[in-house]
Image (cartoon, helix red, strand yellow):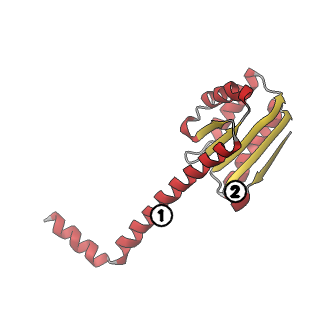
Amino acid sequence: MYAIRVGAGGEVLEAVFSADVPAAEALRALSQASVLAEAGGIAHAFCDVREVDGGLTHGSLQVIAASFHGRSAPDQRVAVVCNQRQLPLARHFARLAQAGEEFGVFTRDADARAWLESVRATSLAETALRHMKAIMSAADPVAAVSAGRRNSA
């Protein structure tokens, strides 16, 4: 069983899984989450699997990981919260999905959310800097052209 929703502020997609999660249900959830994220322009996801107690096999995990990899965007960040017992499986999934740094595995909700916040804060700061530079260069186009000519002489 699973539930997917857009979190407060509309910046994080949240998925919570519980009980038995067969491969078909996991793939359906991945598909729905992907569509929701794309439609809402959401690049960060929080996934809680602590209450999952079965349903996945090694083979189904490979299929789900391949689907995840195929749907991943370069700016997408996913924080997965699992319990201590699930940690090896979650890390194995990350390797199978070739997720890299955009996929974080945590055992505490607060750590996962803090990681997503830090990534979002960094991205926002870089975006703000690009916009500021664009505004500053557009503010006085004559000075920008003059400075360019002076440097090229």
Name the residue beneath numbered marker 1. 128
Spot occupied by residue 125 in the image (x, y as percentages of width and height) = 49, 59
List the single residue furthest toward the top. Answer: 58
Q: What residue do we see at 67% from left, 31% from top?
A: 65
Vertical arrangement, residue 23 with respect to residue 128, above or below: above
User: Viewer-proximal residue, 27 or 8?
Assistant: 8
State the image coordinates of residue 16 (x, y, percent, origin top left). Answer: 79, 43
Which quadrant holds the C terminus? bottom left
What residue is disc 2 on?
A: 39
Q: Gap in Å between the C-alphas at discs 1 and 2?
A: 23 Å
Count of all numbered marks drawn on residues in the image: 2
In the figure, residue 29 lies in which quadrant? Answer: top right
Numbered disc 1: secondary structure: helix
Side of 59 relative to 153 (left or right): right
Q: Quadrant of the N terminus?
A: top right
Relative vertical location of residue 134 with respect to residue 75 in this rendering, above or below:
below
Q: Are there few (<14), some (14-19), or many (20+) residues within 10 Å of tag 2?
A: few
Whichever of labels 1 and 2 marks the residue nearer the N terminus, that label is 2
Frontmost residue, 71 versus 45: 45
Q: Residue at x 63, y 27 (%)?
A: 96
Dividing the picture into quarters, in which one does residue 102 lie? top right
Indicate the secondary structure of the residue bearing disc 2: helix
- Amino acid type of the residue tagged 2 in the rendering: Ala
Which label belongs to residue 18?
A: none
112 with respect to 122 (left or right): right
